[in-house]
Image (cartoon, helix red, strand yellow):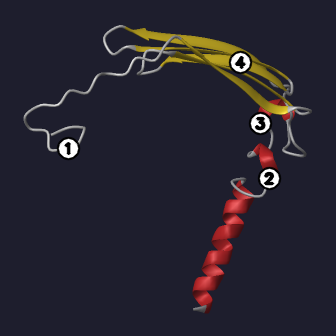
Amino acid sequence: MRAFQVLVFVGVCAVASAGYIGHGYGGYAGDAGGYEGHGDYYAYPKYAFDYSVKDPHTGDHKTQWETRDGDVVKGAYSLAEPDGTTRIVEYTADKHNGFNAVVKRIGHAHHPQVYNNHYDNGYYGYH
């Protein structure tokens, strides 16, 4: 048992000296252009994206866009609901106000008519 403990200790020391563990956030010493893994690296968050899908075969219609500049995020998305309406969500987020969203529904909902048939036993749905 003592030999097994010594073997595990030697293995951990070998892994640590090889640079796989123990060098902090940076991983290997010397990567990232001279960054030695001391302290945290902070990149200013700034991005923008948008996309949309319009599939006439499945009826899948949706869009989304979002921008971020530091701690301020703004965006919106929309999608076609099964009842024929379009849901639009506009949102913002920052460190002072938190996350805020405004949800809108455009159009009138259309629900299918349920008809009784000779198999109906008082329940609606699939038979």
Q: Secondary structure at mark 3?
A: helix
- Spatial CA span between label 3 and label 4: 35 Å
Answer few, some or many: residues within 10 Å of disc 1's Cα (few below 14, many 20 plus, some between 14 and 19): few
Residue 24: horizontal and vertical position, in percent?
Answer: 81, 51
Question: Viewer-nearest of labels 4 and 2?
Answer: 4
Q: Which residue is mark 1?
A: 122
Instruction: Identify residue type, mark 2.
Output: His
Q: Secondary structure at mark 1?
A: loop
Residue at 58% x, 84% y: name it: 4
Question: Viewer-nearest of labels 3 and 4?
Answer: 4
- Spatial CA span between label 4 and label 2: 38 Å
Instruction: Identify residue type, mark 1.
Output: Gly
Q: Quadrant of the N terminus?
A: bottom right
| Label whose residue precedes the other's in the sequence (2 or 1) | 2
Circles 2 and 1 in contact, beta carbons < 8 Å: no
Quarter of the image where one finds residue 113: top left
Q: Which residue is mark 2?
A: 23
Q: Which residue is mark 3?
A: 31
Q: Looking at the image, which residue sits at the far left?
A: 118
Residue at 86% x, 37% y: name it: 41
Residue 83: horizontal and vertical position, in percent?
Answer: 42, 20
Q: Where is 90 relative to 56, above or below?
A: below
Answer few, some or many: residues within 10 Å of disc 3's Cα (few below 14, many 20 plus, some between 14 and 19): few
| Label whose residue precedes the other's in the sequence (1 or 3) | 3
